[in-house]
C-alpha cells in the first residue's frame, strides 16, 4: 500500500457533517439565513438513521395543534425538563421551536395528517401528558430527510459524499477545519485525505451506533462522536441510552401492533434447535403475561421501573436468553401457549383495546393483519413472511439520550463547533416518544441562527495548515504501521469483538465488575490499533472507525463506572446489578437491582478527554428561564440581534 503524504484542501465558511434530518435542516437553514458559503460532507448520502429507520407508526413530538388541550410552550418544555438531567433552557428552546420546525416540514411536503377541518391531530406517547405526538407513518424520518435533501439541493448547497470524518482540527479551543478520508479515492495516496478549512462546523453525525453489535440502528450508520471527543469536545449524560426489542434482519423496532397482536415468544440454540417458549413461565398466569406483551407495544423502550412487575420484564427475559447464547424469535403463526386466548383473562386496558379494534380472534398473524396489514407488508418487502416464518429479535440499542454537551445555541465547549440531532446531549434519563425528531430540527434551527448572528472569521491559512500537517503526520505514521494481508488480526474481527464486548457488559444490564473488566480490555486494545491488518487501502476506513469507536467506548464506560461509584442506581434503560437489590420473578438470580430514587435527577454528568485521561464532573441542571420579560424588552433585544445579523 502506497503511503499518503499530503491532503487535498478545500475551504468553506460553515461545514455541516452528516446528512440526516438534523444536518440537512442545518444546511438549509444556514443558507436561508444568508450564510450561503455552506457545504455538507457525509459518509453516505443515503445512510444514517433518519433515512433508514422507523417503526409501525414513527412518532414526531411537537406542541399540541388540535383538540381542546390547553397546551403551551412552557408546558411542553416542562415535560421535557422533567425527563431528569435536562437543562431548562434547552428544554424551552426545543419546545419554542417545535411549532415552527413542524410547520416547516409540512410546507416541504411531509404528509402529517389533518382532520377535515385542518387540525393536525395528535395522540399520547410515552412520558407525554398531552396529545402532542403525530406521525406520517412508518417512515416519518425518511420522509423528513428526503424533503429536506430536496430543499438543500434546490438551494445549490454543495454536498461532498463518501467522506469519512476522521479528525477535527482545533487550535486554541477554536475549530479550524476537518480532515476526512475520501472513500471514493482511498486507493490513491495523493487523493486519499481531504482537509476542509472552515470557521464553523455543525456536527450532525447521529448517535455513536458503532459501539454496539446488537443494534436497531441501520447497518450503514456508525456515528462519529469519538472524533469530537478526541478533539476535546465535552460529553454529557453518556450513561443514558434507550434499548428496545427489535428484529435482527431487517433491523426494525417491533413496537406497536407487533406486540398488541400478542405474538408467541420462543428461543433456540445457536443452530435453531432446542426450541423453548420461555416467556409464560416467568409470569404468575397467562393473562398477566399476555397483558404485558400487549403493553410492550407502546411501552416499547426498556424501562427499569417496569422491570419488577411490568412490561419491561419481557425485555430482561429476552436479554437473559441472549446472554446464554440463545436466539429469540417472535412467532405470529401460533398463539402463546399453543392454544386459544382467553380474552377475559387480559387486563381491562388490553381487552378493551382489542375489542374496540375487533381483534379478539384467531392467531397473532390474523390479529396483526386485521389491525395493521402494512406492518406485515413491511417484513414481506424485506424477505420475511410473518405468515409462514418466525422473526428473530433481540434487545437492541436504539437511541443515545446523551452525547456532546451543548449550550442553548447548540454550541459545544469548542468555539465554532456545534452539535445537532442525536449527536447532541439534549435529552435526559427519559424523554417523550418522538421528541428526538423535534430536537434535531429545533437544534439545527438554533445552531443556524447562532452562526448567522455571529458567523466568525475563517482561520488563518497558517493555522489551518499547521493543524492539517500535524493530523496528516499521525495518519502517515498509522499507515506505515498497518499490515496489508498479513497474519495480524483482521480489522473487521477486532472491531466486531469490541462491539460484542460492549453489548455484553455495557448494554441494558451492567455491573461494576463487568464494566471494570471492559474498561481494562478497551485500554489494552487501544495501543494495538496499528497492529491490525487490512486487505486493501479502502479498509483504512475500518482502522479509523476502530480508533474512534474505542475512544468512544472508553468515554461511555468510564462515565458508567463513575456513575456507579458515586452511588448511582438503576434508572432509565439501564439496570445496574446490585447484590443487595431485588430480583423480578422468572429472571436469573444475578439480575438483582435497586431502582434510582431520583437523587441525581437535577444533575448532569459531564466528561472530557484531556491528556489521555477522562475528566468527569457533575453540575446542577440549569433551571427553566424566567417568564417575567415584557414584550417591549424582548422586542428591543430582538431588533438589536437582527440589526447585527444584517
Image (spheres, grey):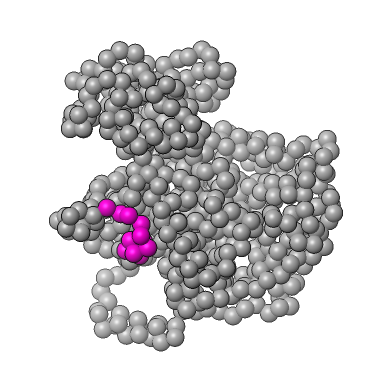
Position of 199 with respect to 136 (left or right) is right
Q: Residue at x 53, y 21 (%)?
A: 326
* Callout count: 0
Q: Nearer the viewer, residue 137 or 260?
A: 137
Residue 225: percent from left, percent from top? 58, 54
Q: Residue at x 34, y 46 (%)?
A: 137
- Residue at the limit of the structure toward the left, as seen here: 68
Can residue 33 be spotted in the picture? yes
Q: Is residue 497 above or below residue 464?
A: above
Is 108 contained in the magenta span? yes
Q: Quadrant of residue 71?
A: bottom left
Q: Quadrant of residue 470?
A: bottom right
Residue 4: percent from left, percent from top? 81, 59
Residue 11: percent from left, percent from top? 65, 73
Q: What residue span does the magenta drawing correspond to? A: 102-113
Q: Nearer the viewer, residue 231 or 515?
A: 231
Position of 343 with respect to 318 (left or right) is left
Position of 635 with respect to 499 (left or right) is left
The C terminus is located in which quarter?
bottom left
Q: Residue at x 64, y 58 (%)?
A: 163
Residue 525: percent from left, percent from top? 71, 41
Q: Nearer the viewer, residue 639 or 197?
A: 197
Amino acid at each position: 500500500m502506497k503511503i499518503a503524504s499530503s491532503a487535498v484542501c478545500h475551504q468553506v465558511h460553515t461545514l455541516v457533517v452528516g446528512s440526516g434530518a438534523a444536518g440537512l435542516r442545518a444546511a438549509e437553514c444556514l443558507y436561508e439565513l444568508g450564510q450561503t458559503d455552506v457545504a455538507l460532507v457525509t459518509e453516505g448520502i443515503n445512510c444514517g438513521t433518519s433515512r433508514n429507520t422507523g417503526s409501525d407508526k414513527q412518532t414526531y413530538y411537537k406542541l399540541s395543534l388540535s383538540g381542546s388541550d390547553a397546551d403551551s410552550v412552557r408546558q411542553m418544555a416542562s415535560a421535557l425538563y422533567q425527563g431528569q438531567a435536562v437543562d431548562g433552557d434547552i428544554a424551552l428552546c426545543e419546545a419554542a421551536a417545535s411549532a415552527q420546525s413542524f410547520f416547516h416540514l409540512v410546507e416541504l411536503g411531509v404528509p402529517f395528517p389533518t382532520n377535515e377541518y385542518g387540525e393536525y391531530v395528535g395522540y399520547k406517547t410515552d412520558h407525554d401528558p398531552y396529545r402532542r405526538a403525530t406521525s406520517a407513518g412508518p417512515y416519518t424520518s425518511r420522509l423528513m430527510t428526503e424533503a429536506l435533501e430536496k430543499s438543500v439541493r434546490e438551494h445549490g448547497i454543495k454536498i461532498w459524499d463518501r467522506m469519512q470524518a476522521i479528525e477535527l482540527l482545533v487550535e486554541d479551543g477554536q475549530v479550524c477545519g476537518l480532515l476526512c478520508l475520501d472513500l471514493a479515492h482511498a486507493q490513491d495516496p495523493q487523493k486519499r485525505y481531504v482537509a476542509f478549512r472552515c470557521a464553523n462546523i455543525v456536527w450532525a453525525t447521529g448517535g455513536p451506533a458503532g459501539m454496539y453489535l446488537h443494534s436497531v440502528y441501520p447497518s450503514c450508520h456508525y456515528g462519529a462522536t469519538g472524533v469530537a471527543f478526541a478533539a476535546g469536545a465535552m460529553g454529557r449524560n453518556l450513561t443514558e441510552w434507550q434499548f428496545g426489542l427489535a428484529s435482527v434482519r431487517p433491523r426494525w423496532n417491533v413496537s406497536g401492533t407487533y406486540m398488541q397482536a400478542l405474538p408467541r415468544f420462543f428461543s433456540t440454540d445457536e443452530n435453531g434447535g432446542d426450541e423453548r417458549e420461555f416467556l409464560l413461565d416467568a409470569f404468575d398466569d397467562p393473562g398477566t403475561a399476555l397483558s404485558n406483551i400487549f403493553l410492550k407495544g407502546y411501552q416499547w423502550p426498556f424501562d427499569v421501573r417496569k422491570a419488577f412487575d411490568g412490561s419491561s420484564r419481557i425485555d430482561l427475559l429476552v436479554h437473559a436468553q441472549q446472554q446464554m447464547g440463545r436466539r429469540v424469535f417472535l412467532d405470529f403463526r401460533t398463539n402463546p401457549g399453543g392454544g386459544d386466548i382467553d380474552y377475559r383473562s387480559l387486563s381491562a386496558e388490553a381487552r378493551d383495546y382489542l375489542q374496540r379494534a375487533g381483534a379478539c380472534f384467531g392467531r397473532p398473524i390474523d390479529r396483526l393483519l386485521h389491525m395493521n396489514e402494512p406492518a406485515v407488508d413491511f417484513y414481506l418487502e424485506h424477505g420475511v413472511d410473518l405468515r409462514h416464518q418466525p422473526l428473530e429479535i433481540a434487545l437492541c440499542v436504539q437511541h443515545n439520550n446523551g452525547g456532546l454537551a451543548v449550550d442553548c445555541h447548540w454550541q459545544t465547549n469548542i468555539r465554532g463547533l456545534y452539535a445537532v440531532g442525536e449527536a447532541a446531549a439534549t435529552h435526559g434519563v427519559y424523554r417523550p416518544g418522538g421528541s428526538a425528531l423535534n430536537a434535531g430540527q429545533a437544534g439545527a434551527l438554533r445552531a443556524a441562527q447562532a452562526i448567522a448572528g455571529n458567523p466568525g472569521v475563517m482561520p488563518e491559512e497558517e493555522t489551518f495548515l499547521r493543524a492539517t500537517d500535524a493530523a496528516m503526520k499521525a495518519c502517515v505514521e498509522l499507515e506505515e504501521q498497518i499490515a496489508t494481508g498479513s497474519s495480524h488480526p483482521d480489522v473487521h474481527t477486532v472491531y466486531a469483538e469490541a462491539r460484542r464486548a460492549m453489548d455484553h457488559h455495557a448494554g441494558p444490564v451492567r455491573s461494576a465488575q463487568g464494566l471494570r473488566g471492559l474498561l481494562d480490555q478497551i485500554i489494552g486494545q487501544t495501543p494495538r490499533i496499528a497492529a491490525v491488518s487490512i486487505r486493501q487501502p479502502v479498509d483504512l476506513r475500518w482502522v479509523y472507525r476502530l480508533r474512534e469507536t474505542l475512544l468512544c467506548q472508553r468515554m461511555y464506560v468510564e462515565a458508567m463506572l463513575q456513575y456507579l461509584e458515586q452511588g448511582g442506581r438503576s434508572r432509565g434503560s439501564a439496570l445496574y446489578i446490585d447484590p443487595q437489590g431485588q430480583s423480578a420473578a422468572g429472571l436469573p438470580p444475578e439480575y438483582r437491582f435497586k431502582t434510582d430514587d431520583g437523587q441525581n435527577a437535577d444533575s448532569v454528568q459531564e466528561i472530557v478527554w484531556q491528556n489521555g485521561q477522562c475528566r468527569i464532573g457533575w453540575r446542577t441542571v440549569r433551571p427553566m428561564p424566567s417568564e417575567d420579560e415584557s414584550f417591549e424588552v424582548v422586542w428591543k433585544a430582538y431588533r438589536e440581534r437582527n440589526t447585527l445579523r444584517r
